[in-house]
Amino acid sequence: MVSAATRVAAVIGDPVRHSLSPAIHNAAFAATGLDWVYVAFEVPAGRGAEAVRAMDVLGIDGLSVTMPHKADVVGAVDDLAPAAAALGAVNCVVRRNGRTVGHSTDGDGFLWGLRDSLDVDPDGLRCVVLGAGGAARAVVLALAGAGAAAVQVVNRTGERAVRAAALAGAVGSVAGPVSVADADLVVNATPVGMGGDAGLPCDPSLLSSGQTVVDLVYHPATTPLLEAAAARGARTGNGLPMLVGQAAAAFTLWTGEAAPVAAMAAAVTAAD
C-alpha cells in the first residue's frame, strides 16, 4: 500500500503515456516487497533539466529518462557515469545524498538480453549495427566493451556513422550494407519494421544460418527482418529483452537490490 513513507521513482518523456516502464518497475517493487512506487510524468520537450532539478525538492529517488530528454539531462545532473558521459545521453538518474548521477543502462540492457535470451556472448564476434541514433550508439559502445572483434556501423548518413563507430575505438569502423553478409551478429537499431512497417533495414539475401540477428524493435514482436532472418536459418531476437535489461539495471542502481527479472519480463509480456 502506498503511504507517506513510500519512495518514488518515475519516468519522464514526451509522449510518455504509452510507456511500459510503470508496469515493469511496479512489478519489480511488488516482487521484492520494496516500499516504492513508479509513476509517469509527461514533461514537455526542453524541460527535462527542470525535472531533474526537482528530484531533490520532491524527494524522487530514481528517474527514467526517455525521448526527447536524454541529451538535455546530461547537463542537469551533478555527475555522469562513464557510459552516459561517452554517449552524451542519460536514461537513468539516481539521487543519493542530495546529489544526482546520470547513467546510461541501454548498453547493459542490450548485453543482458543478448546473453540471457539468446545465449550469445559478443566476445570475439564480428558485429554490424544498422543505424547511428541513440540506441545504436549505446549498442556500439556496449559491444566494444564486451570484447567484440569488430563493430561496423551501417547508416545512410556518413557523418553520424563515423561518430557512432568511434565509440567502439580500435574495433569500430563504418561499413556498407554488404558487410551484413560477413557478420556473426547483426543488430537493427533503426525504426524500420516498427508498428507494422513492412520495410527491411538490409537486404535479406545477405542473411544466413550461423548468424544472430537482433531487432531492437519490439512492437511487433516479429518484424519483417526477423522473419527474413529466421527463414534463412539465423537465430533471432527482438528488443523486449533489452527493455527489461535496461530497466533491471536501473532498478539495481536505485535500490541496491538484485532485480527480479522474471517478474519484470512477465509484466512486459502482459502489458504489451
Image: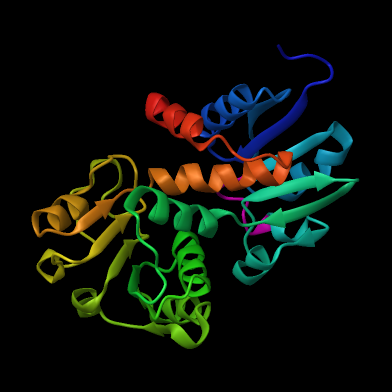
**In this picture, residue 153 sits left or right of residue 211:** right
Magenta stretch secondary structure, dominant? loop
Location of the N terminus by quadrant is top right
Picture residue at 47% right of the left edge, 75% below the top: 147
**Viewer-nearest residue: 49 or 35:** 35
Splitting the image into 4 quarters, where does residue 268 fall?
top left
Splitting the image into 4 quarters, where does residue 266 fall?
top left
Q: x, y (%) of residue 83? A: 63, 66
Q: Which residues are magenta?
A: 65-72
**In this picture, residue 111 sits left or right of residue 59:** left
Location of the C terminus by quadrant is top left
Whether residue 110 is visible to the viewer of this picture, yes or no, is yes
Magenta stretch: includes residue 39? no
Q: Is residue 12 above or below residue 156?
A: above
Q: Is residue 58 above or below residue 95?
A: above
**Viewer-nearest residue: 149 or 166:** 149
**In this picture, residue 44 sits left or right of residue 125:** right
Picture residue at 38% right of the left edge, 29% below the top: 269
